[in-house]
Image: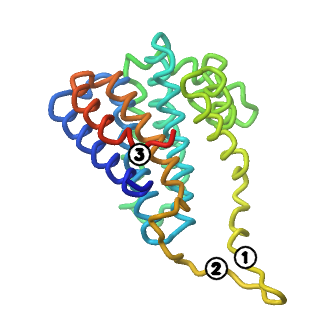
Amino acid sequence: MKPYDLLKESIKFASKQLEDFKVTKSLDDIPTMVITSLYRKIIELSEGVRVSGANGLSGPALLNYRGLIEAYLAFKYILENEHLLEDRAKAYKIGYHKQQVEAGNYSLKRASNDDERAFFESAIQYHTNEMKNESLQDIFKVFNELQNRNSKGFIPKWYELNDGPRTINQLAKYLAEKDEEDKELVANLYGFLSTDAHNYMALNSILKSDELITVKPVRAFFNSNKDEYNFLGTRSLLTSSILKFMQSAFPENESNFLAFAQRIAPYLRY
């Protein structure tokens, strides 16, 4: 099974696993809600890499892969410490609502008619009310204290709480040092984030031949025998997430997971 086919099979299993989970479980507590949402995002971004690659679109494939890395690191960080899992999930949820309120206020100032103003006011009110949830107030207070320390009042990264990492690169480095089992994988992600941090990669589309300088075609030829779109890395992140989701939220799915793992094991390179 080639990297593309293996990724496709992994996405198929993960999507079925998520659908089975939704039928038998509820999202009535914040940790489950956040973990499940992140897992869904990981599957979606994995599919984004696959579809972009299959259509020869290296730029979108790379953007989806970077988004996947960030979603995976968030997912892994929340699950990394059982004692801090609930606090980290709450911080993630608060950070989401704060970002939505900020975006809503920005758009409200630029609304051109009453319907637009009403829409943004309603969205701001919804996200504000969500943060008033009594179960969030302990973390909400800490989150606000951290935000108030910033001279410009910028919203902190949710993982900064409890003296956590301050950037996505620091988060990757922290997890690489913390987890011996997954150390090589996360270390590779840290290297990827560091290399592509400033989005200068647009210049890799330049082609030089003698005196001629041109740019690559928007769509490249898709060769399933080669892994030019991070199919291998995407599959690795996805299968790691499948395992973590099963262990943390859906242990009843273990027999299906073991059958899946046995089926793909002969084709895994790491």
**Mark 1 and mark 2: span between their CA atoms?**
6 Å
> What residue lies at 59% left-to-right and 81% top-to-bottom?
217
* Dot placed on the residue nearer the N-terminal end, 3 or 2: 2
Classify mark 3: residues with Cα within 10 Å, few (<14), some (14-19) or many (20+): few
- Where in the figure is residue 26, as x and y percent of width and height? 21, 27
Residue with the most extreme bottom position: 211
Q: Amino acid at mark 3?
A: Tyr
Q: Identify which residue, 4 or 47, lies in the foreground.
A: 4
Q: Which mark is residue 267?
A: 3
- Where in the figure is residue 192, as x and y percent of width and height? 66, 47
**Mark 3 and mark 2: span between their CA atoms?**
32 Å
Q: Are marks 1 and 2 in contact (CB under 8 Å)?
A: yes
**Mark 3 and mark 1: span between their CA atoms?**
35 Å
> What residue lies at 22% left-to-right and 27% top-to-bottom?
255
Residue at the spot of label 1: 206
Could you tell me if residue 23 is visible in this image? Answer: yes
* Dot placed on the residue nearer the N-terminal end, 1 or 2: 1
The mark closer to the camera, 3 or 2, is: 3
